[in-house]
Amino acid sequence: MVAYNNIFKIKRNNLLPNKGSILISDPFLQDAYFQRSVVLLVEHNANGSMGFVLNKKTDLVISDFFSDLENLSDIPIYLGGPVSSNRLFFIHTLDGLIPDSLQIAEGLYFDGDFDILKKYIIDRNLIKGKIKFFLGYSGWTKDQLRFEIKGNSWMVSHSVGGNIMLADGESFWKNSLEVLGNQYKTWINYPKDPHLN
């Protein structure tokens, strides 16, 4: 008889997180916020880490919060994480157009002057694939993320399976795992709720 008890034990890639890194949740992670999630780290240093869940779209749109944007096409809001869930954050690719933005990686920025961003949107500039909004963020205190990675809650990656600005749903999680290599195919096929099998 063949033993299947190690079928999902996969050697980790041992990459260390940095600002701009991607965290891909382990398929066994059952946390309501982070199950099948892909997180972009916008900050990572000795004091802790901050990031946004890229692929969990809410039913909210930006015009729900700003009446001066109500006549524009629906701009979705994503669930960034459990911290400060009543605050709106954004990332963008508008290099040089939004003052006070913080660079995450080449061509990718966090935050900035929101009034200038709103004017950019009101002037009907292209938004899709350039700006992404989040309610709340994902945060880790000093050494917390390191322990979670060591405890196999996250895989670290420096690339994803698609455009992070358009990332949505479980398919983005699966595509991001595929980028890591064939050895992760068993993870992709692991049921979301194994008790239902």
Image (tube, grey):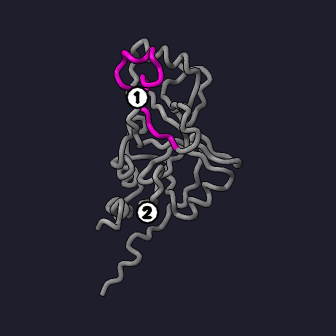
Which quadrant would residue 14 be assigned to in this image? bottom right
User: In the rendered structure, which amino acid carries the disc numbered 1?
Assistant: Val
- Compared to 10, does 92 lie above or below? above
Residue placed most toward the observer, 10 or 141: 141
Residue 140 painted magenta:
no
**Magenta span:** 62-81
Judge left or right: residue 154 versus residue 186: right
- Residue, far top: 123
- Whether residue 76 is visible here, answered yes or no, is yes
Up/down of 81 relative to 8, above or below = above
- Residue 42 picture quarter: top right
Quarter residue 148 falls in: bottom right
Q: List x then y, in percent, for residue 98.
A: 55, 20
Residue 61 badge: 1
Q: Would you name the residue on which mark 2 appears?
A: 28
172, above or below 184, in the image: above
Callout 2 amino acid: Phe
Label at residue 117: none
